[in-house]
Amino acid sequence: MTHPFFADIAPVQYEGPDSDNPLAFRHYNPDEVVMGKRMEDHLRFAVAYWHSFAWEGGDPFGGQTFQRPWYPQDAVENAKVKADVAFDMFDILGAPYFCWHDADIRPEGDSFAESFDRFQGVIDYFEDKMSTRKTKLLWGTANMFGHRRWMAGASTNPDPDVFAYAAATVKMCMDATHRLGGENYVLWGGREGYETLLNTDLGQELDHMGRFLNMVVEYKHKIGFKGTILVEPKPQEPSKHQYDFDAATCIGFLRKYGLENEVKLNLEQGHAILAGHSFEHEIAVATAEGMLGSIDMNRNDYQSGWDTDQFPNNVPEVALAYYHILKSGGFTTGGTNFDAKLRRQSLDAEDLIAGHIGGMDICARGLKAAAAMLEDGGLEKALADRYAGWATPEAKAMLDSDFDSIFARVHGGEIAPEPRSGRQEQLENYVNRFV
Ligand code: XLS
Ligand code: NI
Ligand code: NI
């Protein structure tokens, strides 16, 4: 412990499902082997610096509710206090990874150069800590949505000076991610979208975003960064419409700009819900294209219509998400980042720990349920049965034939479709045996 903030809280241990200790893991047991791999290596949990340490409890109607020893955050010396407390929390949780934006870790300076120097100072401090601690960097990213300069976008800004500022910012963040051994670099286009088409040249903005992302990839290769470049879909908020709407939109965008072999997706539960999808839909779209990179695990409120970034607490939903992840082979460089924050009334140090324990336990239960379903093979078998017709030589040959020959077979009576049950209720009952 380097700071008294968490001094009353011991490192969290796995105590099993019967434990009534509120600060113990009941399901997340890092060393337990699931489908041939340690749970910690499957899930690859990360703590999000912004929600846990930078966000002060504000909402659109009121400001700061938290009181933390690293406030005010615009004081340079407090960045180190914040880092001390953050690394204490990583140790308490046994978190294998963390993630940051530049803006989370240093106060903004009066010029780019001043912000840069402050940022470098914190990265040095992180590097020093990381040399003796276990927590590694899952990904770094740039906050190009908070400051007023970004109000009309970063790479999609009508002002080329803002494009330039964005390029310099991303270079800085990629360099730092590379230096800290980060395993991915994320771009979430917070204001890469528009408020009104009345003042927006949508085609030009998309071209600029495509060129910018190509510059990211060119720079990755230039510096020898071996991590994965990820884009994070979200349909709206803060922009009315965001160009990275959902997984399918991003994949189309990446193909259009020749990036499909270079960039993968970081999918977030809450963003899937905002786009009108389920989380497993987004994951299935990405895995079908070989483009799943990493996930931002949280939960969105199903009524509110904005991004509530709560800790997950629904095992059946999480289980289906991990089912699709495991089915596609699991994470490589990616992981499970808790892009989740406390509620603004949850004031205590203990709440931060409890939020993460709950999220980690829910994910562990989901992972175990997903693994059990895969090992049992019931869904796979049902899928194979449903598509069995396509395994026949006639069906395969049909795909290489043409409409005229197919017409002849159908018209001649050789083919007469017989509808079969989709068995949805039976499959839902099956899933419920595991969750
Ligand atoms: C916001 C996004 C953000 C990204 C990183 O909605 O989820 O937190 O994950 O910029
Ligand atoms: Ni989000
Ligand atoms: Ni996110």
Image: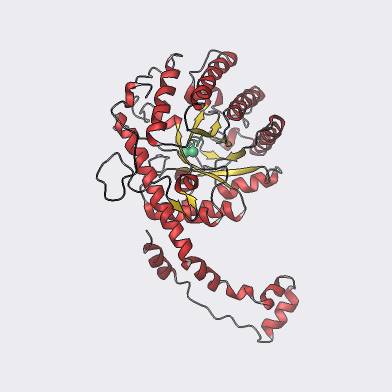
Q: Can you give x and y, in whole percent of width and height, for residue 86 in the image?
A: 41, 27
Q: Which image quadrant is residue 219 in?
A: top right
Q: Which image quadrant is residue 211 in?
A: top right
Which residue is at the front of the view, 175 or 189?
175
Q: Which residue is at the far left? A: 20
Q: Can you give x and y, in whole percent of width and height, for residue 149 in the image?
A: 55, 22
Which residue is at the front of the view, 366 or 13?
13
Q: What residue sits 62% from the left and 37% below the top? A: 227
Q: Is residue 425 left or right of residue 161?
A: left
Which residue is at the front of the view, 268 or 273?
268
Say if 382 sits above or below 414 in the image.
above
Q: What residue sits 61% from the left and 44% below the top? A: 264
Q: What residue sits 35% from the left and 25% below the top? A: 63
Q: Is residue 366 visible?
A: yes
Number of callouts:
0
What colouring does the structure picture have?
secondary structure
Q: Can you give x and y, in whole percent of width and height, for residue 216 in the image?
A: 66, 33
Which residue is at the front of the view, 38 or 62?
38
Q: Is residue 48 left or right of residue 186?
A: left
Quadrant placement of the C terminus: bottom left
Q: Is residue 66 visible?
A: no
Q: Which residue is at the far bottom? A: 413
Say if 115 sits above or below 410 in the image.
above
Say if 104 sits above or below 240 in the image.
above
Q: What residue sits 39% from the left and 46% below the top? A: 29
